[in-house]
Image (cartoon, rainbow, N blue to C red):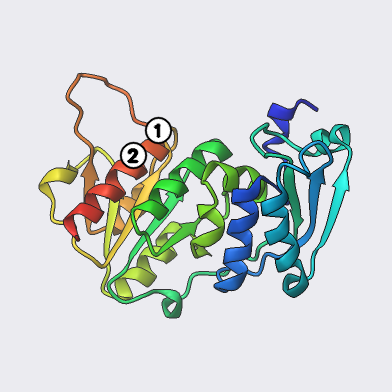
Amino acid sequence: MKKEESRFIESNIFEGMVSIRAIINSCDNCISDRRITRVFVSDDKAKKRAKELSYIKARSYDLGYSIETIPQPDFDEMTIGNTHGGLLCECTQRTIPELTADAIKDNGFYVMLDGIEDPYNFGYAIRSLYAAGVDGIILTPRNWMSAAGVVCRASAGASETIPMYMSDGIRAAEIFKAKSYDVICSDIKNSVSVYETELKFPIFLIVGGEKRGISSELLEACDKIVRLDYKTDFGMALSAASAASILTFEIMRQNL
């Protein structure tokens, strides 16, 4: 199998020190139940990564994982990218809990991502959401967290350090409305410009993929529909990752 194709395969291999630190931080802060089982080090890079390895070894005593140095060819067989710096880890799966009202903060900001077609784009979107201060991400049953290592690397570790919950859109909207949240959908029909709309916390934002969009049933259940206006007559949708980034930073700006 080509490495490009392997990014879509379910895997719990995480590449690079950023990913390893993110999982350790997630453990420390009780964000998820994912745990590192083994860390692998390329024999070609072991001396150059002495500082990182010292940290990894120190944390192995309380987190209970092993550390193995392996030949570079064997290491390469385990990786997809080439920015790992000679470090990767094998992990347990992460349990994504069902969304409940008790899990939702008062006066918070949550986002549902639905219909993103690629795990890298999914990770890029999560990176932006985390940077914009989103309190949690709601996932539909179809999501890219099975390819968690790819998502983690693309999100610069954010996917492992932000709370995530599972729900279908209609159920999620009902739960957030019961908590007095405004449910905001991103779409074109019957919409107003995001820059002409008051978007104050608490907010639950739903961003659909550029191909399938948001279902009509879910659009009817939302409180406001917002759009991104273009300066040019482009006629095409932005990627869901780009749209999510712009929308979340505008919401952040309005709530500073």
Q: Amino acid at mark 2?
A: Ala
Which residue shows up at 50% across the image and 37% down it? 121
Which residue in the protein does label 1 denote? 239
The percent coordinates of residue 64 (x first, y second) are 79, 70
Snapshot quadrant of residue 209: top left
Which residue shows up at 71% across the image and 34% down it? 80
- Is residue 173 or residue 112 the one in the foreground? 112
The percent coordinates of residue 148 (x first, y second) are 64, 50
Q: Is residue 63 above or below residue 8?
A: below
Q: Residues within 10 Å of mark 1 (few under 14, many from 20)?
A: some
Point out the image quarter for the N terminus: top right
Asked whether the beta carbons under mark 1 and mark 2 sit within 8 Å of each other, the answer is yes
Q: Secondary structure at mark 1?
A: loop
Which residue shows up at 31% across the image and 69% down it? 108
Q: Amino acid at mark 1?
A: Ser
Q: Residues within 10 Å of mark 2 (few under 14, many from 20)?
A: some
7 relative position to 157: left or right: right
Q: Can the viewer see residue 203 in this picture?
A: yes
Which label sits on residue 218? none
Residue located farthest toward the top when viewing the structure as drawn: 233
Which residue in the protein does label 2 denote? 243
The percent coordinates of residue 98 (x first, y second) are 54, 69
234 relative position to 55: left or right: left
Snapshot quadrant of residue 212: top left
117 relative position to 110: left or right: right
The percent coordinates of residue 253 (x first, y second) are 20, 53
Q: Can the viewer see residue 96 in this picture?
A: no
Point out the image quarter for the C terminus: bottom left
Q: Secondary structure at mark 2?
A: helix
- Is residue 194 or residue 158 the one in the foreground? 158
